[in-house]
Amino acid sequence: MRDASATLWRALRSGNPIIAVLYEDAGLLEELVSEMESLLPIGSKVQRSSDVSASFQTPDAFLFLAPPDERQALLTLDGRRDALLDRRSPVVLLLLRGGEGVQSLSDVPGLSSWLQGNEIDPYRLQQIDPKHERESFEQQTGRSPEEWLVDYRAGRIPGTLENSLLATRAGLLENPP
């Protein structure tokens, strides 16, 4: 199962000058930014802004940028990509999934190429494909989640940390809808 927090953690530490994080709706934006802030190293400088010009200031601060005009922000960032190279902490560009910014990425091919592989959609990462996950579990253990749990619960599989994690995973996959 994919882990949105782990993906965000890696992206925030990747060394890239800019990453894009998609959000579901404005009501969830604060929660998402707070979660990302909790993933930062202790003592990190953090800045939040809706003004794209903040991207070219304080290069050692993690900048969470939620511009009101996403298309214009993309154009500005694309036009000043070289200035972003001075950043020691990334600009986290927050774009509304399906919004104007995402739709405008094709208008900024330079910036779009920088963002390729650095676009994170936490909502989609939290979604699982039960069929795929079951197949993955069976490939890893050689048994269905239900079969594996029968043996685990009967004590025929040792209670190691790894097996405890597998038990949790199997329980989530047990008897799919």
Image (cartoon, rainbow, N blue to C red):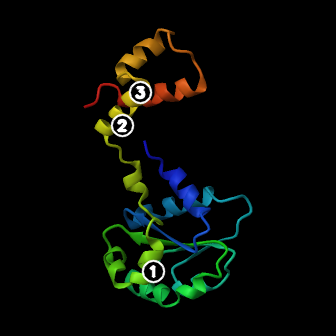
Marks 1 and 2, the one that precedes in the sequence:
1
Q: CA distance from mark 1 to mark 2?
A: 34 Å
Q: Secondary structure at mark 1?
A: helix
Marks 1 and 3, the one that precedes in the sequence:
1
* Quadrant where the C terminus is found in the figure: top left
Identify the residue at image location x=69%, y=75%: 60
Q: Nearer the viewer, residue 176 or 85?
A: 85
Q: Position of residue 126 (x, y in %)?
A: 41, 48
Q: CA distance from mark 1 to mark 3?
A: 41 Å
Which residue is the site of mark 3? 170
Q: Position of residue 54 (x, y in %)?
A: 59, 84
Circle 3 Cα neighbour tier, 10 Å, few/some/many (<14 / 14–19 / ≥20): many
Q: Secondary structure at mark 3?
A: helix
Give the side of residue 40 with respect to residue 27, left or right. right
Eyeballing the image, is 116 above or below 131? below
Which residue is the site of mark 2? 133
What residue occupies the far right of the structure in this picture? Answer: 43
Which residue is the site of mark 1? 111
